[in-house]
Amino acid sequence: MVEYNLSTIEAFQILDENPTYRAVNAEGHTLELRGEEKFIIHRRIKLAKDKHVSLSDKWRIVKPISYELANELFKKLRTIECRFDDGTKKFYNKMPDNGHVIIESDLPYGKDCLWYCFSYYEE
């Protein structure tokens, strides 16, 4: 079971010290700090019940993973995000919205990108 045990302030402190980390709460909102100015970037998934985050929310940290681990998780039908240096991102999913499984067996190898899987957590 995934634990969301960090307060919003604690999550921001960790993100401040580790610029490649991201924070996610149980509803799917994500937080990150970007750039020298450390702008707060907040995203929410379409299914999130609440449109906002608060200081009382609980978070967990998502760290970048290796290409090898991302590829293994991709083969197990997990959604993988590739975040490039310029801030753009690309999502890879073997099971797209239309329900037709993608036959390719591996993720394309990306240079200068960080791999994330928000449904993966280290135990």
Image (cartoon, rainbow, N blue to C red):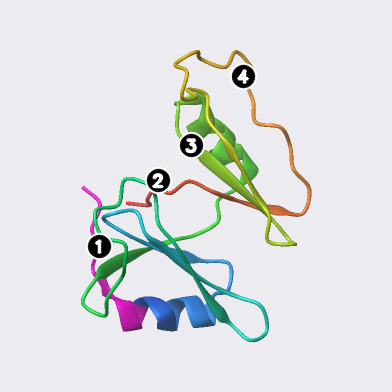
The residue indicated by pointer 3 is 79
The residue indicated by pointer 2 is 120
Q: Earlier in the sequence, mark 4 or mark 3?
A: 3
Measured along the vertical axis of the image, is residue 65 above or below residue 42? above
Q: CA distance from mark 3 to mark 1?
A: 20 Å
The residue positioned 21% from the left and 77% from the top of the image is 56
**Label 2 secondary element:** loop
Q: Are marks 4 and 3 in contact (CB under 8 Å)?
A: no
The residue positioned 51% from the left and 82% from the top of the image is 16
x and y percentages locating residue 84 in the rendered image: 71, 55
**Label 3 secondary element:** loop
The residue indicated by pointer 4 is 105
Camera-side residue of 91 and 17: 91
Magenta segment boundaries in residue numbering: 1-10
Q: Earlier in the sequence, mark 3 or mark 1?
A: 1
Q: Can you tell which of label 2 and label 3 is closer to the viewer?
A: 3
The residue indicated by pointer 1 is 4
Instruction: Describe residue 100's horizontal placement relative to residue 122 as left or right.
Output: right
